[in-house]
Amino acid sequence: MTRSIYDIPVEPLTGGKTDLTAHRGKVLLVVNTASKCGFTPQYSELETLWKDYRDKGLMVLGFPCNQFMAQEPGTEQEIGEFCQARFGVSFPLFAKIDVNGKDEHPLYGELKRGAPGLLGIRAIKWNFTKFLVGRDGRVLRRFAPITAPSKLRGAIEQALGAQG
């Protein structure tokens, strides 16, 4: 049975427990991130999207993951400091999670169920896989790691109901 993504417990990078209830009614861009990946510079474009669209209802949510060639080895504090110092990240980041396997975070289970990858494969293949979630909490699309965040503007604007 599918449950609402808003009710799934998550842990902010700074600690504690919460869920995504505060983001109900917003468009979400959920990304599994890593600090030592060839795609790490995408943090800059994600931050730009966040700044450009947050007042229209977009939330960018970063979930660090160390499952791909150990490219996110740091502690939560190190991850936060790196993202802020190197890319000026101000969108919400969460504690490290697994996006695949027996310890897969339930949020990623729901995201992958809602938007399987190529050929229906659910597994996340690499860092910076992006999921766009509509205001109703339904997963709209999945974008490959190679897809630059700047290329998501049209899909984001459509999801927001905005033009331009």
Image (cartoon, helix red, strand yellow):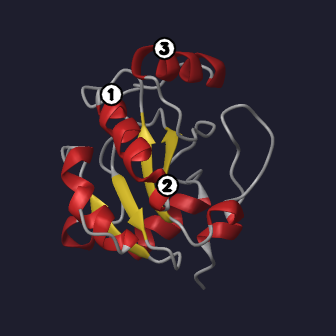
Residue of label 1: 40
Q: Is residue 24 left or right of residue 43?
A: right
- Compared to residue 147, the image places residue 70 above or below, namely above
- Compared to residue 54, the image places residue 73 above or below, namely above
**Quarter assignment of residue 74:** top right
Residue 89 in view of the camera: yes
What is the quadrant of the C terminus in the image?
A: bottom left
Residue of label 3: 85
> What secondary structure is found at the residue carrying circle 1?
loop
In this rendering, the label closer to the viewer, 1 or 2: 2
Q: Position of residue 64 (x, y in %)?
A: 50, 36
Q: CA distance from mark 1 to mark 3?
A: 13 Å
User: Could you tell me which residue is drawn at 55 percent across and 22 percent down?
Assistant: 79
Residue of label 2: 55
Q: Position of residue 66 (x, y in %)?
A: 47, 32
> What secondary structure is found at the residue carrying circle 2?
helix
Q: Residues within 10 Å of mark 1 (few under 14, many from 20)?
A: some
In the rendered image, the residue lying farthest to the bottom is 1
In this rendering, the label closer to the viewer, 3 or 2: 2
Total labels drawn: 3
Q: Nearer the viewer, residue 65 or 11?
A: 11
Indicate which disc, 1 or 2, sits on the residue closer to the N terminus.
1
Q: Position of residue 59 (x, y in %)?
A: 50, 54
- Compared to residue 116, the image places residue 44 above or below, namely above
Q: Residues within 10 Å of mark 2 (few under 14, many from 20)?
A: few
In the rendered image, the residue lying farthest to the right is 16
Q: Position of residue 143 (x, y in %)?
A: 26, 57
